Structure formats: C-alpha cells, structure tokens
C-alpha cells in the first residue's frame, strides 16, 4: 500500500491590508500548528463518586508563529509591520496542499509580535506572532486560490 503523506511545499498565506483586502505574504518558511483547545469547566458535585467531572467550555483558537524570509522594506515586511502597529484584528487565510486545489483555513488574527532576525552568515528571517481570534473556518477548495479576493 502506498502512502498519502505530503510535504507542506506550496502552502500560501494571506493577511488583510489596512483596507481589508487579503494580500498574499511572500517567502513564507514556517506555519504554526492550528491548535484549538476547549476550556475545561469543573462540574464536580457532591455525588461525583470521588472523581472530578468536567465539561467543555469555550474554544480558544490559540496562538502561533508564521516564519518568513525577511526582505527589508518588501511588501510582506511592510504589511506585517503595519498590521502590528494597527493593533486591530485582521482577516487571514492559509492554504495548504492537499493534492488538488488545497485546503483552506480562514479567520481573524491579531499580530501580537513581529521579530526580524539578521544573522551575520545566514538568511535574514522574520516571525509574525499571531493570536487567532474567534472561529477558524476550514474548507476544501474546489478551484485554484486567487490573489486573495475570495476564499
């Protein structure tokens, strides 16, 4: 039996600019885990038979770091720096390869941090630290993703 495993090569990431238009970020090198976790609510009562009982609460969409090759003053550098300075939640979209047109994740995020790393003998990189806000939608794409105008 053959495997269905794939690499992440070809993944693409868009972030909304100041006017709300999704703009593809260039030179992406790492994608964070999308790790949504539910809060635990202690529902233990006097007849819980000696063990704590829990129910699920609200879901936290989490945080993550997107990595890029840094091109100082380039479109991606300017977009992320502007998003960080605005302190506003922005729309985002991530498309990962699935053998067809891709599998998309969409939602809102807040850029909590933007770190630029400039080593003496290696490539320059940048890290966008995101706090995902609200629900993250998932969908299999049925056509090639466009430049950001639609999902």
Image (tube, rainbow, N blue to C red):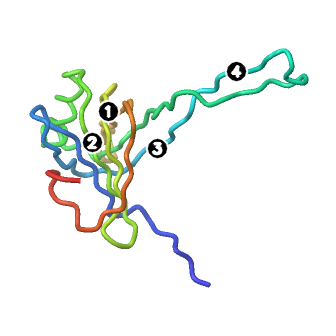
Q: Nearer the viewer, mark 4 or mark 2?
A: 4
With 51 as the anchor, is 150 left or right in this view? left
Drawn side of residue 125 relative to residue 64, left or right? left
Q: CA distance from mark 2 to mark 1?
A: 7 Å
Q: Earlier in the sequence, mark 1 or mark 3?
A: 3
Do labels 2 and 1 touch, CB within 8 Å?
Answer: yes
Mark 4–mark 1 Cα distance, whole angstroms, equals 29 Å
What numbered label is drawn on residue 34? 3
Describe the element under mark 1 as helix, strand or loop. strand
Q: Position of residue 104 (x, y in %)?
A: 34, 55
Q: Nearer the viewer, mark 4 or mark 1?
A: 4
Image height of 125 relative to 85, above or below: below
Q: Nearer the viewer, mark 3 or mark 4?
A: 4
Q: x%, y% of residue 114? A: 30, 30
Q: Quarter of the image containing the N terminus?
A: bottom right
Label 1 crowd (10 A; few <14 / some 14-19 / many >=20): many
Q: Nearer the viewer, residue 138 or 147?
A: 138
The mark nearer the N terminus, 4 or 1, is 4
Q: Residue at x 52, y 70 (%)?
A: 5
Crowd tier of the residue under label 4, counting other residues whose Cα lies within 10 Å: few below 14, some 14–19, many 20 or above: few
Give me the disc on residue 42.
4
Q: Which residue is mark 2?
A: 92
The residue wearing badge 1 is: 109
Mark 3 Cα shell of 10 Å, populated few (<14), some (14-19), many (≥20): few
As displayed, is residue 121 above or below residue 130? below
Mark 3 or mark 4, which has the lower sequence index?
Answer: 3
Q: Quadrant of the rendered structure where residue 17 is?
A: top left
Q: Quadrant of residue 133?
A: top left
Nearest to N terminus: mark 3 or mark 2 = 3
């Amino acid at each position: 039996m053959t495997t269905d495993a794939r690499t992440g090569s070809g993944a693409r990431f868009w972030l909304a600019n100041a006017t709300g238009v999704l703009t593809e970020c260039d030179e992406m090198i790492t994608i964070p885990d999308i790790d949504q976790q539910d809060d635990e609510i202690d529902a233990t009562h006097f007849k819980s038979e000696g063990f704590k009982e829990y129910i699920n609460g609200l879901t936290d969409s989490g945080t993550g770091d997107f990595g890029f090759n840094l091109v100082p003053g380039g479109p991606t550098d300017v977009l992320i720096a502007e998003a960080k300075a605005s302190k506003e939640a922005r729309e985002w979209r991530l498309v990962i390869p699935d053998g067809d047109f891709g599998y998309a994740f969409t939602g809102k995020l807040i850029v909590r941090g933007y770190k630029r790393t400039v080593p003496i003998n290696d490539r320059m990189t940048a890290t966008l630290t995101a706090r995902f806000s609200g629900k993250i939608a998932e969908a299999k794409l049925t056509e090639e993703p466009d430049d950001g105008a639609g999902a």
